[in-house]
């Protein structure tokens, strides 16, 4: 039988169950719940959801000129923040 590859141990009931399923086939507990939470956390950190200044097509020429360096400064700022978050995740472990 070729089942060992996909088996996962359920943290709730300790039975080995099909790892392709989202929930344990014995007790129904969600498999990989902590893993999914961790992924969700990383997605939240990776996407700070801070809006960049938008350059619109209908903006006057001088507005586009003025917005460009602000946008670059924002990108650099967010890159530094992302790097700091990256550092804290390294040292947190
Ligand atoms: Zn279970």
Image (cartoon, grey):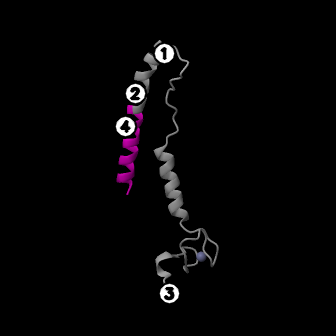
User: Dot 3 corresponds to which residue?
Assistant: 1
> What residue sits right under mark 1 in the picture?
63
Crowdedness of circle 2 by 10 Å Cα count: few (<14), some, many (20+)?
few
In this image, 58 relative to 62: left or right?
right
* 9 sits left or right of 78 in the view: right
Mark 4: few/some/many CA within 10 Å (<14, 14-19, 20+): few
Q: Is residue 24 left or right of residue 62?
A: right
* Magenta stretch, residue numbers: 76-93
- Between disc 2 and disc 4, the foreground one is 2
Label 2 – label 4 distance at C-alpha? 12 Å
Q: How many tags in the picture?
A: 4
Q: Which residue is mark 2?
A: 72
Tell me the quarter of the picture where residue 26 sits. bottom right
Q: Give residue 80's mark.
A: 4
Q: Is mark 3 within 8 Å of ligand 1?
A: no
Mark 4 lies on a secondary structure that is helix
Identify the mark nearer the N-term, 1 or 2. Answer: 1
Q: Nearer the viewer, residue 85 or 78?
A: 78
For label 1, being within 8 Å of ligand 1 is answered: no
């Amino acid at each position: 039988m070729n089942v060992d590859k996909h088996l996962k141990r359920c943290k709730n009931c300790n039975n080995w169950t099909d790892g392709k399923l989202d929930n344990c086939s014995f007790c129904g507990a969600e498999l990989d719940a902590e893993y999914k939470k961790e992924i969700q956390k990383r997605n939240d950190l990776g996407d700070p959801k801070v809006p960049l200044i938008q350059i619109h097509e209908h903006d006057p020429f001088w507005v586009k000129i003025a917005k460009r360096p602000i946008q670059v400064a924002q990108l650099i700022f967010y890159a530094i923040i992302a790097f700091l978050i990256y550092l804290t995740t390294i040292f947190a472990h």
